[in-house]
Amino acid sequence: MRLQEHQSKALFAEAGIPVPDSLLAESVEEAVAAATELGLPVAVKAQVRVGGRGKAGGVELAKDRTAVRAAAERILGMTIDGHLVESVLIEAAVDAETELYVGITIDREAGQPVAMVSREGGVDIETVADERPAAIAREPIDPAFGVHGYQARRAAYEAGLDREIVGEVASVVTALYELWDDRDGREAEINPLMITDPGGDGGGTDDGSADEDSRVVAADAVFSLDDAAAYRQPALAAQAAEPADEFEARAAEHGFDYVRLEGTVGVIGNGAGLVMATLDLIDQLGGAPANFLDIGGGADADRVAAAMELVYDDQSVEAVLFNVFGGITRCDEVARGINDALATLDGPPKPTVVRLAGTNAAAGRDVLDPALRVERSFEAAVEAAIAAARDTPDVETDGDATDGEVSDR
């Protein structure tokens, strides 16, 4: 449950982390008025719950009112990774000497929180972690005791920061961890944490959230709430609960467990474990899943049809894999739902592979629309879907399955 940047910055300011002056705007005129109030230059920043805004053209520096208007007109209404931009943050520009990365997350292997500091801020930190892991200083934290001052300072020193700035960066690390812990965070990041010129304007707010003499300023802010702790943070959960894009909104209407990913193979299944296994096998066999969609147990024909239409409408999906194991869910009922969806669409608009196993699987396979590719084995179904997404000839299967036929593999 990820907050938008302006929501995250409000949390950061409450925690004592310096942030720039900013105002939220939902129209071009509001954006121009906000820039006038704050003083130019300003940054015009798309408000969506995904990263990569800069690469997508969702962040622009504007030096005058004309530039602010042009930037707001361009950014408002654009789509970034499937997320519609409905508001922009107008933020006082910060004159930075250095850009850092500071983050708190869970180290899954160690089973404990970790604080991270790097001099390579302002770029994709995942790329830095993969290509130059030594560029990120990591400090494990015992959740029973929290972060100690010496740990925060050590992370700053190991990141190679100058001595005169270590204390302020360490204070940000400490405040960020305490916020992450108090508010049940999953991850909290500042990228970049800007180090301003000595004696310069750090861009701090006038309400006391940022020390005017501070040289550190959180130019960006990411805070994600742990879904399992949402009941303990109702105010944050309410802010993060709004669906991030049209597909998530549609999935929420039907109560689907749905997550949009970045691949080309659309996935529908019943049961989180089966869907996760499907995603893993797609990745293992060289494909890339476009989504996680669990229709749940006991799905009737209407529910199945809604899931199919949702995945078909995703323009990033090149092929669809429907993987069902019948227990509570009857495979013949699922098959009727698939046929109902196809009837409204005059056939499958994209290559579709179906694998049915379990309760009434044979009956379900018998009634499936002949335009579908049907596979009995898990692996064969995944291979066929990957091949279809790549627009390559179908892979060979032991049963020589074709459209409407069943492989015994």
Image (tube, grey):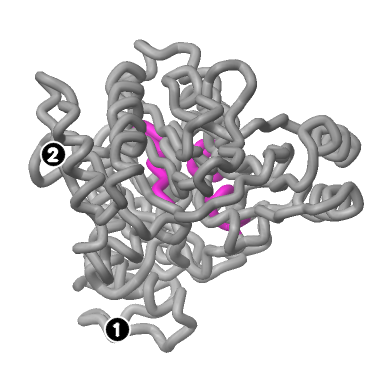
User: The N terminus appears in which quarter of the rendering?
Assistant: top left
- Residue 309 visible in the displayed image: no
Residue span colored magenta: 291-314
Magenta-drawn stretch contains 201: no
Residue visible at 10% across and 37% down? 111
Outermost residue toward the front in this view: 199
Q: What residue type is labelled 1?
A: Asp
Q: Residue 191 location in percent, x, y?
A: 45, 48
Count residues near mark 2 (Cα–Cα under 10 Å), then give few for <14, some for 14-19, many for 20+. Answer: some
Q: Residue 86 location in percent, x, y?
A: 73, 39
**Any mark on residue 140, and which?**
2
Q: In this view, does 160 lie above or below 376?
A: above
- Return the residue at label 1: 400
User: The C terminus appears in which quarter of the rendering?
Assistant: bottom left
**Any mark on residue 330, and which?**
none
Determine the secondary structure under disc 2: strand
In the foreground, 359 or 102: 102
In the foreground, 242 or 30: 30
Count residues near mark 1 (Cα–Cα under 10 Å), then give few for <14, some for 14-19, many for 20+. Answer: few
Q: Would you say 98 lies left or right of 381 here?
A: right
Q: What residue type is labelled 2?
A: Pro
In the foreground, 269 or 10: 10
Of callouts 2 and 1, the N-terminal one: 2
Q: Would you say 91 lies left or right of 400 here?
A: right
Q: In this view, does 249 lie above or below 375?
A: above
Q: In which quarter of the image is residue 54?
A: bottom right
- Residue 406 visible in the displayed image: yes
Q: In which quarter of the image is residue 385?
A: bottom left
Q: Would you say 264 lies left or right of 405 here?
A: right
Q: Which mark's residue is nearer the viewer, 2 or 1?
A: 2
Residue visible at 31% across and 17% down? 182
